Amino acid sequence: MDQREVREAWEKFVERGALSADLRSSVAASWQRSKNHQITVDRARAPLVADAELFRYRSKHASLRHAARCALENSKTFLSDANSIMILTDPTGLIIDTQGDDRVIDAGRTVHLEHGGRWSEADIGTNAIGAAIAESKPVQIRGAEHFCSKVQRWTCAAVPVHDPTDGELLGVVDISGPASTFNPQSLALAVSVGHHVESVLAQSVRQDREELLCHFLAKRSLWVNEEFIVLDRRGTILHATERALNVLQNNRHGIDGDAPTRFLKALPFDEWPGKLKELLPNASFDLVENETSGIGAIVVLPARRRLSIADREAQKLKPALERRETARSSHSRKDSTLEFQHLEGKVGSTTCSFIAHDPTVRTIVRQVETAAARKMPILIRGETGTGKEQLARHAHAASGRTGAFVPVNCTALPESLIEAELFGYADGAFTGARRGGAIGLVKEAHGGTLFLDEIGDMPVTLQAVLLRLLDDWTVRPVGGARTKVDVFLVSATNATLDKAIAEGRFRRDLLYRLNTLEVTLPRLNDRIDFEAIVHHLLGAIDPNYEITSATIAHLAARPWPGNIRELRNMLARFTLVAADGLTDEAGLKALIGQAQLTTAGSLHDIQNARILAVLSETAGNISETARRLGVSRNTIYRALGQKAPR
C-alpha cells in the first residue's frame, strides 16, 4: 500500500474500527493494540521523564549503553547528512541515548523523540520502537502507519536487542528520520547494528566469566575440602559440586527450581550477600569484582564428606597449574579458562573433552550427570558431529563407574553374528569360533558403560535381542551359561525415531526403555560458545597454535553442516600449514574460502548482503567497511540507498 492508501485505511480504522485487509499485519496488529491502550490519535508527543529518573535508567542499563557506544558514535559520521538519527532505548521503550544528524535530533524534541521520551505502544501508539518490543522482532513503520497523527511525520526502523545468555529483552536500536527520508535499507542497517550490540554483549559476558574463573582457579586450593558454587553476574551457575547443588535446591524456598539463583540478576550487586545468606545460611561468599562492576560470586559450603575423585585429581593437577600460572603472559584469561575446563572434566582416569559454556548445553550436561549418577538409561539426539559420543563419555565419567566405556556402532554389527558379538560365545560354539571363546561387548561393559551409537539405524533383529537384554540384564553367551551383568546404558542417534517407528523400522517399546532421559544437542551454529570450542579443540590438536579473534569471527560465520567434527578438521588443517604457530592471512583465507558462498539470490543481493555483514562488523563505519571490501565509500552509500555526503 502507498502512503495515500495507508492514510485512508487509518482514517477508516479511527472512525469505524475497521482494519483493511491490505494493511501489513504488523501495522494492523499495532493499531489494534494502540486502540486497546486507549491512545488517542491527537496525542501530540510521547511522555517525558524527569532528568533524575533518566539518570537512574541510564545507570541501570550501563552495560547496554557501553555495548552500543561504538555503533552510536559511528552513526554520528554516517547519519550526520542523511537526515536520520540512531536511538537506543531500554526494554520499556525509554530513550537513553541518541546520535546522528543534529537537525533531526532537534526536530525530534517536538514529539519527545529524545532522551527520556517513552516510546512504547502504551505511551504513544504505533511506532517502530513500541512494535519491536510488542512483537519481539524487527519492525519498520513509515509515515501514515503511525497511530498518532503528529508522529506520522516520521519514519522509523527498530530491532530488539536481547541478552545473549538467556534471551531477555535488554532494549531497542532504532533509526528514525522525517517521513520523506524513508529507506527500506534502514531496517537492514538497524538489524546489523542490533546484532553488533548483542555480539559485544556476548564478548563482555565471556570476558567476565573468564575473569571469574581465573579468580576461582587462584583460590581453588583453599576449597579442596569444601563444597562450592560459582555464579556469574546473571546468577547463572557456571560450576558447582553435587552436594552444593542439592543444598541449594533444598533451600530455595519457593524459588524456581530450574533456576534457583537467577533472581540475583535483577538485584544490585551490593545486595547479593544478604540474599545469598538467606538462601544458604551456612555458606560463606567471595564476591568478585573488576574495575567497573561486580562479575560474580563463589559460594562456599562446609564439606560433609571425604574428597571426591574429581577433587583429588584437581589437587594432583595443582602444581602443573601453578607452573603455567607463573609462565602465563598476555593470554592469561584464555589459558585459565581452558585450564578450568580440563580441571572440571577430570574424573578418575577419564578426561572430559566436552565444552558446555552454552546455557542450553550446560543444562543438558547437568541433566546427564544426574541421570548417570542414578544409572538411568540416556538417549542423546543430535546432528552428526555435535558431540554425542563425547557427551556419552562424559556421562560415563560422571557416573563414577570403574568399568570400561564400550562404544558399539549398531549399523556395523553383522546380523548373522549379532548375539555372538554382543554376548560372546564359548570355546568351540560354532565353526570358525576363536579358541577360548569371546567375552562379548556387553560383558566388556560390566561395571562400566555400554554406548550404542546410531541406534536409529539398528537392524530389527538387533532390536529384539537388545530388548531381551534390557528385561533382566542377563547375558547368555552362545554355547555358554547365563550370567548377570551390571551395565550403564547410553544411546545416540541422528535419525528421526518417530518416523522410523511409524514406518515399522524401530520398536516403540525399545525406545521407551532407552530414553529415561532424552536430550538433544544443538547444532554448532546454534551455540554461543563457539570461541571456547575453538580454543579447546586447538588445545588438543596443537597447544602452541595461536588463532586471532578475526579468524574465529570468520569461522563462526560459516554454516558448519558437519558441526564440531567439521570444525575440528578445519582447525587441524590450519595447524598443518602453520609456521611457528601462526598461519599467514592469505593461507587462512584460502582455507576458509574452500566453503562456497551459499547465499541465494542475484549477484546484487549477494553483494549487498556482504556489505551489510561487514558494516555490522565495523559498527556502521562506512570508511572502514569500504577499506575492508576494497570499494569506494560511494558504493557503500549506494548499497544503503543513501546519498554520499559532499
Image (tube, helix red, strand yellow):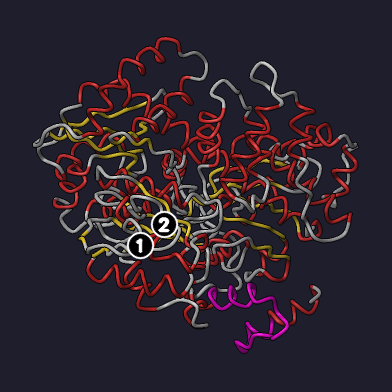
- Residue at the (27%, 65%) spot, across then down: 476
* Quarter of the figure with residue 478: bottom left
Residue type highlighted by circle 2: Ala
Query: How crowded is the residue under tag 1: few (<14 C-alpha within 10 Å), some, or many (20+)?
Result: some
**Closer to us: 557 or 641:** 557
Please tell me whether residue 13 belongs to the stretch shown in magenta: yes
Q: Residue furthest top?
A: 326
The quarter of the rendered structure image containing the C terminus is top right
Residue 92 drawn at (x, y percent): 47, 56
* Quarter of the figure with residue 106: top right
Residue 535 drawn at (x, y percent): 53, 32
* Quarter of the figure with residue 184: bottom right
User: Which residue is disc 1 drawn over?
Assistant: 429
C-beta proximity under 8 Å, tags 2 and 1: yes
Residue type highlighted by circle 1: Ala
Residue 71 drawn at (x, y percent): 65, 38
Q: CA distance from mark 2 to mark 1?
A: 6 Å
The range drawn in magenta is 11-34
Query: How crowded is the residue under tag 2: few (<14 C-alpha within 10 Å), some, or many (20+)?
Result: some
Q: Secondary structure at mark 2?
A: loop
- Specify whether 16 is left or right of 295: right
Please tell me whether residue 14 belongs to the stretch shown in magenta: yes
**Closer to us: 301 or 160:** 301
- Residue at the (21%, 44%) spot, across then down: 242
Our reading of the magenta stretch's main secondary structure is helix
Q: Is residue 163 above or below residue 224?
A: below
User: Which residue is disc 2 drawn over?
Assistant: 433
Whether residue 564 can be seen here: yes
